[in-house]
Amino acid sequence: MTQLFRERVFWLFFLLMIAAGASESSMAQWTSAFAEASLGVSKTVGDLFGPCGFAFCMGLGRLWYGKRGGKVELSRYMTWSGVLCLIGYLTAALSPLPWLALAGCMLSGLAVAIMWPGTISLSVGHVRGGGTALFALLALAGDVGGTLGPSFVGLFTRAQENGIATGILSASFFPLLLIVCLLMLIRSHKKRNNTKQL
């Protein structure tokens, strides 16, 4: 673990995992209350197209990647997934149309599908000799994100007098963080490959 803590790339993956966990959990845990309180739809409709729609789309995303994922570069795929997740969060929080906002919730479910497992897969090729300690620490980071994200939404919701849309908007920070971390990782990988060639 001491060796891991000394590697910059490990801390990049730690942040990446926090962002992945927060991006997934923020919407998953708040979408039902968000649909009912902010969008004005019934609890049944809110639950069906909120958390259920989110989970269904996340399942579809993992199914697609399981079938076709070998043909795409994981880091770039995750970057575009982060962009898609950010669009989903912004659509859910800012759209004046309830159905479009719910579509944003479902879109974010599709986008987060690969984030958690993808981060673990990427770490294997970038962090040498991590072993069990690496996976344990990344799981811890994912749990931190899974706690931090929904808490972030709750704090901003309370600050705006139960404005859940503002809370959801604040959580768009996490997919943005994920995108930044992935771009840094891609840049670092390219730089390392260029150095090897020289």
Image (tube, rainbow, N blue to C red):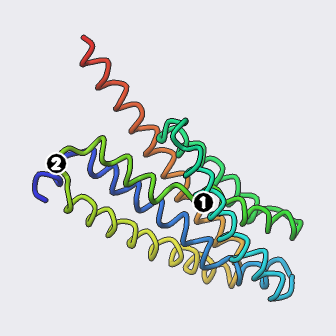
Residue 37 percent across, percent down from the top left: 78, 84
Q: Nearer the viewer, residue 20 or 161?
A: 20
The residue sitting at 57% across, 59% down in the picture is: 113
In the image, which is nearer the foreground, mark 2 or mark 1? 2
* Percent coordinates x, y for residue 159 in the rendering: 61, 80
Residue assigned mark 2: 129
- Residue at image coords 75%, 82%: 47
Spatial CA distance of label 2 from label 1 is 33 Å
Q: Amino acid at mark 1?
A: Ser
Residue closer to the observer: 91 or 13: 13
Q: Residue at x 46, y 60 (%)?
A: 116
**What secondary structure is found at the residue carrying circle 1?**
loop
Q: Residue furthest top?
A: 198
Identify the residue shown where x is 55% and y is 79%. Answer: 155
Q: Is residue 69 left or right of residue 162?
A: left
Left or right of residue 62: residue 18: left
Quadrant location of the N terminus?
Answer: bottom left
Which x, y percent locates residue 90? Answer: 71, 58
Q: Give residue 48's quadrant in the image.
A: bottom right
Residue neighbourhood size for the residue with mark 1, other residues' Cα within 10 Å, grouped as few (<14), some (14–19), many (≥20): many
Residue annotated with mark 1: 172
**Residue 10, placed above or below residue 138:** above
User: Front-most of 189 and 114?
Assistant: 114
Give whichever of discs 2 and 1 has the lower sequence position.
2
Q: Which of the 4 quarters of the picture holds residue 58?
A: bottom right
The amino acid sitting under disc 2 is: Gly
Which residue is most to the bottom? 43
